[in-house]
Structure formats: C-alpha cells, structure tokens
Image: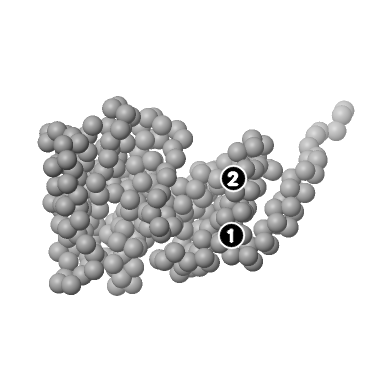
Amino acid sequence: MRIFYTDHFVLPLPQGHRFPMRKYALLRQRVAESGIVAPEQLLIPHAATNAELLRAHDAEYLQRSQAGALTSQEIRRIGFPWSPEMVERSRRSSGATIEACRAALEDGVSANLAGGTHHAYADHGEGYCVFNDSAVAARAMQAEGRASRIVIIDCDVHQGNGTAAILAGYGLMRRMLPASVAALAALLWAADPFVIAYSRVLHVDGLAGTFITLSLLAACVYWFHDRRSRFLILSAISAGLAILSKSPALVLLPLVGLIALVGQEPRTENREPPN
C-alpha cells in the first residue's frame, strides 16, 4: 500500500492563523508509528502539472494563482495569504491524489494524507482550498483511460460545493450539450453569485439551490436525451434532498412535472415531401 504526503510543504502563515497546519505532519507521524505501511511506502508526490489542473480549472484562474495576481477578495475567500509555497503545496496535494488513484488501481488501495480540497471551484478557491484535488484526479483518471465512471464520496460535514459544481453539473450538461458549451455552462453555474454566497458554510439555501439544479438537469437528461432510469432516480433523490433542505423547494414538483409533460409530447420530424 502506497501513501502520499505533502506535510513538509509548509505555508508561511501569520502568527495566530486559525488553520492547523501541523495536523498533516502529526498524521504522517501517526501512520508511520502504527506500522500500517513500510517507511519506503510513504511517498512524496509530484506537483500536478498545468495540463492536469486545467482539466478541472479555468486557465485564467490557474495563471493568476501562479503569478500571485489574485485579488484581495479572492485571497480572503481562500483563507491563506498568497505565497509561492501556497501554490506549490496545492499542486502537490492534487498530485498526491492523482498518484493515490493510480496506486489504488494497481494495488487495490492507496491514500493521500492531505487531500479533500472540495471547496475549490473551477475559477476560484475558497475555504482553504486552492485547487480541487478530487476533481483534478477524477479528470486525470478519465484522460489516462484508467476509469470512465468515478464516484466521489465526501464525508466532510461541509458541502463539497466546488466538486459538485466542477463535476456533477458538467457531467449532466455534457449529455445534452457539446463539450465546450457544457463546460461553459458548468463554469457559469459554479460562478453563480447565489451559490458562491452560501457555499462557504453549511447553509440550507446553498444546499437547496445545488440540489434543485441537479434535479432539474437530471430530469432534462432523462426526458429529452437518455431514458435510462438512473437519471430519473437521480432527479428524484436530488429533489427529495432539496425539499428536506428547505420546504420552498417543493416548487420542483410542478417544474419536473412540466418537463415530463413536454418530454412525452410526440416529436415531429421534418421530411422532404414526396415527388
């Protein structure tokens, strides 16, 4: 079993900063002392390349992150002061998840001791997350032909809002739209001011908004493009979660019903008149 760590890439945080940077070194120490893996199986990952990051992140955001050209508002949203070390550590964190995925597919199991940066969106970071390692690694496995369908199980108490915006929205939109249009639509969803405003905390409005969008997208995919039941089930589950998050989401029921009604209408085909 190979385990990847990045705890020696330390950020120069100001005195009294609330982020517990030491936890990563303590975790590696605990893993080493437990004997779970041999010392030579604790590995330093590569830094994710631009090509790997650009599968999940906007090119302008990546360029400005590297150049230290993020705005003060973007820096506040991330929660770390900008530094070259911040960029390097974030690259290493994504690289660690990529390498852990490769190792898991070869050995059966692997781990990254410093991943889970699920608040990073395609075009901005937040909540101490600069690049979204889960989305970057998932796209890498697809691009390398190692996997086509990937499930990300997020056990954090906070919503994995960045991951959902990068992956879930694009995946559903791609079934209805060309790749470039689907990517643009997913980015617009991720940059929606309402989603951004409520994504920094576990807030019912943010959760309801995300689930409503997923439910409507899945319903459109089912009724207009792909009649496999998985999309109808996804729409129903997302609608249920939206309603549980906030009761005004009941508005989904007539909307999904309208989509179903329109989707059941027979489609006419344009044919040339007979000669």
Q: Is residue 144 shown left or right of residue 236?
A: left
Name the residue that disc number 1 marks: 244
Q: How far apart are marks 1 and 2 (CA)?
A: 15 Å
Circles 1 and 2, Cβ within 8 Å, touching? The answer is: no
Q: What element carries label 2?
A: helix
The answer to which of 66 and 91 lies nearer the viewer is 91
Q: Is residue 168 shown left or right of residue 139?
A: right
- The residue sitting at 17% across, 58% down in the picture is 22
Q: Where is residue 272 in the image (x, y as percent from the top left)?
A: 81, 33
Q: Is residue 270 above or below residue 125?
A: above
Front disc: 1 or 2: 1
Q: Is residue 63 shown left or right of residue 236?
A: left
Picture quadrant of residue 97: top left
Q: Position of residue 86 (x, y in %)?
A: 21, 59
Instruction: Say whether disc 1 or disc 2 marks the residue closer to the N-terminus.
Output: 2
Label 1 CA crowd tier, 10 Å (few <14, some 14–19, many 20+): some
- The residue sitting at 27% across, 59% down in the picture is 65
Instruction: Specify the label residue 143 is tagged with.
Output: none
Number of callouts in the render?
A: 2
What amino acid type should be assigned to the residue bearing mark 1?
A: Leu
What amino acid type should be assigned to the residue bearing mark 2?
A: Leu
Q: Where is residue 156 in the image (x, y as percent from the top left)?
A: 38, 54
Q: Position of residue 103 (x, y in %)?
A: 27, 32
The answer to which of 159 and 268 lies nearer the viewer is 159
Q: Is residue 117 shown left or right of residue 42?
A: right
Name the residue that disc number 2 marks: 234
The answer to which of 147 and 243 lies nearer the viewer is 243
Q: What element carries label 1?
A: helix
Q: Can residue 59 be seen in this view?
A: no
